[in-house]
Each structure stands twice: as C-alpha cells, then as structure tokens.
Amino acid sequence: MKAVENPEFILIQKIQALKEKYENIPEIAQLEEETREIIKQNCITSVQMAAFYFMNCGKNIDSKTEERIGNILQNILDSRT
C-alpha cells in the first residue's frame, strides 16, 4: 500500500497507537482530526490538479497528460485504503 509511506498516514498510524495506549486524551483526538483534514485537503488538491491538466489539454489528451491524470487519481484511491 503506497499511501502508507506518506507522512500523514504514518502520523495517523502513530495517533491510533497512542489512542489505544492512552484513552480519552482530547489533544490526541484533536491531532487525529487535524491530520485527517490535511489528508482530505490533499485529496481535493490532487483532484483539482487532475482537472487542471484535463482542462489545459483541450480536446486532445496526449499520453503524458493522460498518465498524469491517471496517476493523480490512482494515488487518491490508494490513499483511501
């Protein structure tokens, strides 16, 4: 799973481990919420970039642009697992 290598996902894993070890600490819950928001914003930005590539290519999508769009969207899908 490629997404696990992203710093945000490493942070989520560490937060989950802390939640299991130390229950009911509001700062940990807040950190998890903020980290999940960062991940969400990164996904939105990636979709916007894919749309930007698509809009700039006109009616003809060259193979390089198609590959970029596909990679961006695949990274988003990978990050959800």
Image (cartoon, rainbow, N blue to C red):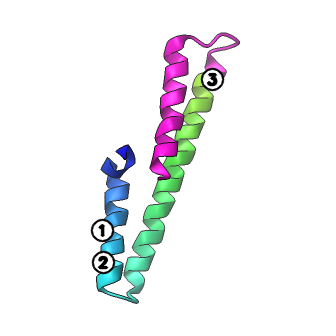
At horizontal 33% and vertical 65% (from top left) the residue drawn is 13
**The disc labelled 2 sits on which kind of residue?**
Leu
The local crowd at label 1, few if under 14, some if 14 to 19, many if 20 or more residues have their Cα within 10 Å, is: few
Q: Distance between the residues labelled 1 and 3?
A: 36 Å
Q: Residue tagged by mark 1?
A: 14
- Secondary structure of the residue carrying tag 2 is helix
Q: How far apart are marks 2 and 1 (CA)?
A: 6 Å
Q: Residue tagged by mark 3?
A: 54
What span is in magenta?
Answer: 54-81
**Image quadrant assignment for residue 32:** bottom left
Q: Which one is in front, 70 or 32?
A: 70
The tally of labels here is 3
- Secondary structure of the residue carrying tag 1 is helix
Q: Judge whether 28 appears above or below 45 on screen.
A: below
For marks 1 and 3, the one nearer the N-term is: 1
- Secondary structure of the residue carrying tag 3 is helix
For marks 2 and 3, the one nearer the N-term is: 2
**The disc labelled 3 sits on which kind of residue?**
Phe
Q: Residue tagged by mark 2?
A: 18
Disc 2 vs disc 1: Cβ atoms closer than 8 Å?
yes
At horizontal 53% and vertical 28% (from top left) the residue drawn is 70
**The disc labelled 1 sits on which kind of residue?**
Lys
Tell me where residue 68 appears, x and y as whole percent.
Answer: 49, 24
In magenta segment, residue 46: no
